[in-house]
Image (spheres, rainbow, N blue to C red):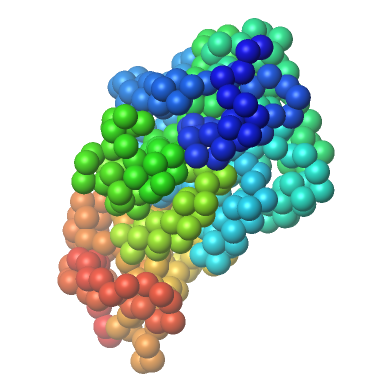
Amino acid sequence: MRRLFSLPALFAFALSVSTAGCATPPDDGDDHGDMTESDVSAAFEQSFREKDDAKADSTGCSGVRVPDRGPFAKRVALTFDDGPNPATTPEIVATLRRHQVPATFFINGSRVKGDTEKAILADIVSDANFKLANHTWSHVNMAEQSSAEVARQIDKTSDVLTAAGAPLEFFRFPFGSSTCATAEAARSRGLKITGWHVDSADWCFAAGGGVCKPATFRYVPDAYRSDMKGYVMSQVHATEGGILLFHDIHRSTADALEGIIEALKADGYTFTNVSDLNTFPKLNGSSAPPAPVAFVGDACKASTDCAFDVWGVTGTCHTAGFCSIPCEGFCPDKAGKAPTFCVQDPTQSTPAGVCVPMAVSENGHCADLPGTLDASADRYVGTSNAPAKTAEVCMPVAP
């Protein structure tokens, strides 16, 4: 195959202009399906249009669309493509651990070249908060490959995942580029095709040295051309959560991740993973959302009514008559339930935080919880790093 770049140039291009799944790995002796910069941009822009083409009932043959369209109740699942990169993936893992944020890493098998990369995979697999998933062998455009090459791209990386001790669960097409035949190839192997709701465009910001140029990706508004965090937040606000696409091969992504996580937390978002049946039931093979389960803010008479576990804490029935958990700074949310907020519990003699429901239509603006009052309350920060904030909540009535 005629190559468009010399190998050194190809490697530099891969680090600077990756794709939504996204940079072609360094040459490993296999064909990589070389693409020009304009090809990369066109593939990303096509995926952006396809993601929001209103086909919400199923993913069909698409590698971009996620069958779950929300509401996500401010639940986000972070995903990282194209690794492992020894220079940046461990830093991203460390940032996620520091903030106790789960994530899924969609790897290119050809990048796992030696003990260093294998150790990175082993570290990820050892953490229950993380998942490893398949992103093809060498990041080719799968819609342009023969059936034999499609099988090779999937199966070689599955072998890498199996050797690392990771289950074979999730698969993402490079660029989200799929056909009915390639989608069937993935599903016939028991893999769940995983698109995204929000493309961070980190590949574009990396390509421009911190600036996402219009010629590279036209869909970033001019106000955010030099502000990746601002762009990500604007997109997450539009969807109120969902699956976010990043790439762990970029230095700029590793550097920006902590600020993005902190901004999401400050806006009341909480984190989950793509395997969350409550948030993404259709992605995970359920034809309908699971049966209702009590959660923070639901009415209760006894703690046995609050048989849920979240963040390693078991729910209990607050004296005001709703399910809750203790908190400092942040509280979890769940799709289909009232959003929550951490306040100082007025029923306690010493300062303590408790998760309460916000005053919203799901609880009749607190009318469904007679032991509470619709009130404006400050966030209970405690020892957390949460910023100060005020919200309208169902406040427990002090005895």
- Nearer the observer, 118 or 354: 118
Give me the residue at 63% from left, 34% from top: 8
159 left or right, relative to 264: right
Name which residue lies at 26% across and 51% down. 362
Q: Is residue 47 visible?
A: no
Foreground of the two, 27 or 66: 27
Image position of 371 with respect to 257: above or below: below
Q: Is residue 395 above or below residue 114?
A: below
- Quadrant of image for the N terminus: top right
Q: Is residue 132 visible?
A: yes
* Residue 109 coordinates in the image, percent (x, y): 71, 33
Nearest the viewer among 267 and 13 is 13
- In the rendered image, which quarter is residue 24 located in? top right
Please provide percent x and percent y for residue 283. Answer: 51, 31
Vertical arrangement, residue 147 with respect to residue 381, above or below: above
Image label count: 0
Which residue shows up at 17% across the image and 71% down it?
375
Residue 203, image x, y percentages: 45, 39
- Identify the image quadrant of the C terminus: bottom left
Q: Is residue 58 left or right of residue 163?
A: left
Q: Residue at x 71, y 32 (%)?
A: 110
Whole-percent x, y for residue 195 in the image: 48, 30
Q: Nearer the viewer, residue 245 or 347?
A: 245
